[in-house]
Image (cartoon, rainbow, N blue to C red):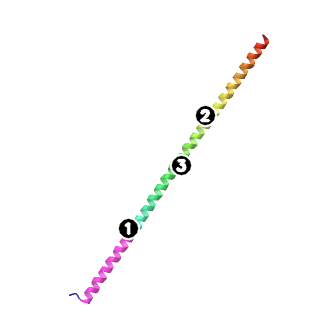
Amino acid sequence: MYTDSEIDLLIDDLTVAALEAIEQAAGEAARAAFLASLEREAAALRETQRWRLEAELQKQALAEAKAAGRKKIWLAIGISVVSGLAVGVTGTLLIRK
């Protein structure tokens, strides 16, 4: 039916086609692995950015709390001074009478 040379030619053609298919599959697998790696890297970068933003918000909240604390301290000092003066003046006036 087929000659030996035709069979050898068919085997060679099939071998070439198989090797090309293997190379193409290997290339696609490499691309898929690279894309998966990029997706993981992008997710890691998003997570890093989220934590950086969270840290900035915490830093800002801490600065605001410190500022509010300082205002309260100065207010307490002012009230204490005024109260002390009021008590001192009142006491002095009561003692003089």
Considering the numbered disc 2 on the image, is that residue within a helix, a strand or a loop?
helix
* Mark 1 closeness class: few <14, some 14–19, many ≥20 residues within 10 Å: few
Q: Main secondary structure of the magenta part?
A: helix
Q: Position of residue 70 (x, y in %)?
A: 64, 34
Residue that appears at 69% across and 28% down: 77
Check if mark 3's residue and mark 2's residue have beta carbons within 8 Å.
no
Q: Quadrant of the C terminus?
A: top right
Magenta span includes 10: yes
To which residue does mark 1 refer? 28
Magenta span includes 28: yes
* Mark closest to the chain's N terminus, 3 or 1: 1
Check if mark 1's residue and mark 2's residue have beta carbons within 8 Å.
no
Disc 2 marks a residue whose amino acid type is: Ala
Q: Position of residue 19 (x, y in %)?
A: 35, 77
To which residue does mark 3 refer? 52
To which residue does mark 2 refer? 68
Q: Position of residue 57 (x, y in %)?
A: 54, 43
Disc 3 marks a residue whose amino acid type is: Arg
Residues under labels 1 and 2: Cα distance?
A: 59 Å
Magenta region:
3-29
Quadrant in the rendering for residue 62: top right
